Image (cartoon, rainbow, N blue to C red):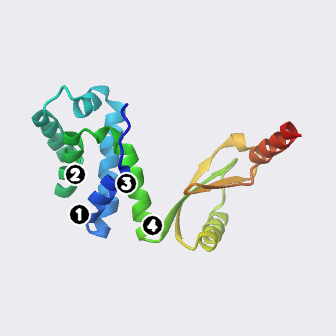
Amino acid sequence: MKKVKGIKKYARQLIKSLDINEVPAAIEQLNAIAGLMDKDKNLRTLLTSPLFKKEEKQKAVLFLAKKVNMSEKTTKFLDYLAASGVIIALSAIISAMQAIYFEMKQKAKAVVSAASEISGDNRQKLAEALKKVTGKDIEVSFLIDPSLLGGVSIRVGSTLYDSSIKGQLGLLRDKLIKG
């Protein structure tokens, strides 16, 4: 896979063409296309290979746009990505769009992993604590990861807060190895 430069530039380009309230729908629509590309190798080849003509790629994009009920602006953007050969980086562009959108809305996404289910009351307290720490509205996703053994691991953007037993054992192992 070739390395695509300017991922954030492409993400900003679409966000600038949309109303701020249209961005989540565009992200969802592009995620649907990225998912289809991941599942279907032939579709991925059609959209990314230089062996296919621009018109063939455009027909495929229009077909997909109808299937996922894509807006006109998002369809044009996807067509542009396919024509310019950077659609291979669609997942990275979507991630960049999400980060830019959250920054614009003063929001952050947190992924909380725990060894067992977290009760509704504790989920609310955790979301409020994360809002205080980050100073942003937090969109929280909860995952169950039995390998943590106990405690929680929280990822907000690129920051990791790890109070899990697995994480603490890893730190202890590192200290013992260093001496």
- The residue located at (29%, 41%) in the rendering is 86
Q: Name the kind of residue labelled 2 in the image.
A: Phe
Crowd band around label 3 with a 10 angstrom C-alpha radius: few (<14), some (14–19), many (20+): some
Label 3 to label 1: alpha-carbon separation: 14 Å
| Percent position of residue 130, x then y | 62, 67
The residue where tag 1 is placed is 17
Q: State which tag comes first along the sequence, 3 or 2.
A: 3
Q: Dot 1 lies on which element?
A: helix
**Discs 4, 3 touching: Cβ within 8 Å:** no
Q: Name the kind of residue labelled 4 in the image.
A: Glu
Crowd band around label 4 with a 10 angstrom C-alpha radius: few (<14), some (14–19), many (20+): few
The residue where tag 2 is placed is 77
Quarter holding residue 71: bottom left
Label 2 to label 1: alpha-carbon separation: 9 Å
Query: In the image, which disc is placed on residue 103?
Result: 4
Q: Dot 2 lies on which element?
A: helix
- In the rendered image of this protein, does residue 50 appear above or below residue 17? above
Q: Name the kind of residue labelled 1 in the image.
A: Ser
**Discs 2, 1 touching: Cβ within 8 Å:** yes
Label 4 to label 2: alpha-carbon separation: 22 Å
